[in-house]
Every structure is written in structure tokens, then in C-alpha cells.
Amino acid sequence: MDGFDSLDPHWAWVVIGLVLAALEMLVPGVYLIWLAVAALITGALTFGLGLGLPAQVIVFASLALISAFSARRFLRDSPIVSSDPLMNQRGSRMIGQIAIITQAFDGGTGRVKFGDSEWLARGPDGIEGDKVRVTGSEGAILLVEPVNMLPPAEGETSADAEAQPEA
């Protein structure tokens, strides 16, 4: 077995391109795919034009730079918009929801229950059992205000604001 001596250069580029494409699927980062495209095109040009090794390397490097920077510009000008931009930001998803104080707020910090989880929270002092509304988050700490401190929304009475169902 001669090793790589019997492998045609264009097949080497195709294999490199396919390996890079497979790696992009395993470790997504939207970068290796452009190198894979450059390697596949280099393989096609090597097959069609019979390029020597120095020309192959120059073509690959040029195509890699062109494809990577073109993709970067395209993605900057036309970003991929998520259908759920708050998917991995649970604290931000809870803004406006009602929680119940489970550990009294002393000095502005305590714990609240939201759904089936308890969260550290910051807000005005309150006693256990009081309802609070989530107004924001700082990492894993929820920022809360007592429900009765918030003015009612337009067209809503204060009794309606306090009677909203818990999430």
C-alpha cells in the first residue's frame, strides 16, 4: 500500500471538504462550513485544471478568505432572526409574571416561588406569602415589586391587577 502517493490531489481536497463539513455539523459554529466550501471548490478546480500543489494552496487560502468574509458580511447584513429570542433567558421570560414570597425579604433580598421553582430575588421588604411581580432579572436573581405598588394598566382597575392568575 502506497499510502497517499496513489491518492489524486482533487480527491484529497474533496475528502478534506467533507471532513470539514461533517465537523461543522458536530461542532456548529458557522465557520468550518466555509472552509469546507473552499476545499470542495479547490478539489473541483484541481480536477478540472490540473493545478500544482502551490496553486492549490493559494486557491484554497483565497477561497477560504473570500467565503468566510462574504458569509460574515451576509450574516451581518441579514441576521438570522429567532422565533423565540428569550428562549435561553428564563429570567427575562418571567417579566410581568406573579410570584409568591417564600422567604421574607430582609434588607432587599429574599426568595420567591415561581411555578415549581424558588428563585433568589431582590426588591422592597416583604413578608412570606405576599405576591410580587417580576420586573427584571440580573443573572439568576429576579427583580420584583409588590403587586399592589404597581399602577394598574390602562383600562384595568386595581382589583383586576391583583386578581390576575398566577403563572
Image: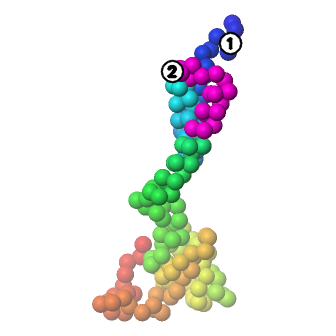
- Quadrant for residue 112, please give it: bottom right
Q: Identify residue for label 2.
A: 48
Q: Which quadrant would the N terminus be assigned to in this image?
A: top right
Find residue 158 and report its horizontal and vertical position in percent.
37, 93
At 64% from the left and 28% from the top, the residue drawn is 55
Q: Is residue 47 located in the magenta-colored stretch of the structure? A: yes
Q: Nearer the viewer, residue 88 or 161?
A: 88
Span of residues in magenta: 46-63
Q: Distance between the Cα atoms at labels 1 and 2? A: 20 Å
At 64% from the left and 10% from the top, the residue drawn is 6
Q: Which quadrant would the C terminus be assigned to in this image?
A: bottom left
Find residue 89 and report its horizontal and vertical position in percent.
53, 65
Q: For mark 2, does the 10 Å Cα neighbourhood hold few (<14), some (14 to 19), or many (20 or more) residues?
A: few
Q: Is residue 166 visible?
A: yes
Q: Nearer the viewer, residue 21 or 113?
A: 21
Q: Is residue 29 above or below residue 12?
A: below
Q: Nearer the viewer, residue 84 or 152?
A: 84
Residue lying furthest top? 1
At 39% from the left and 87% from the top, the residue drawn is 162
Q: Nearer the viewer, residue 83 or 125?
A: 83
Q: Main secondary structure of the magenta part?
A: helix
- Quadrant for residue 101, please give it: bottom right
Amino acid type shown at disc 2: Gly
Amino acid type shown at disc 1: Asp
At 47% from the left and 58% from the top, the residue drawn is 77
Find residue 62 and report its horizontal and vertical position in percent.
60, 38
The secondary element bearing badge 2 is classed as: helix
Q: Is residue 78 located in the magenta-colored stretch of the structure? A: no
Q: Earlier in the sequence, mark 1 or mark 2?
A: 1
Q: Identify residue for label 1.
A: 5
Find residue 126 and report its horizontal and vertical position in percent.
57, 89
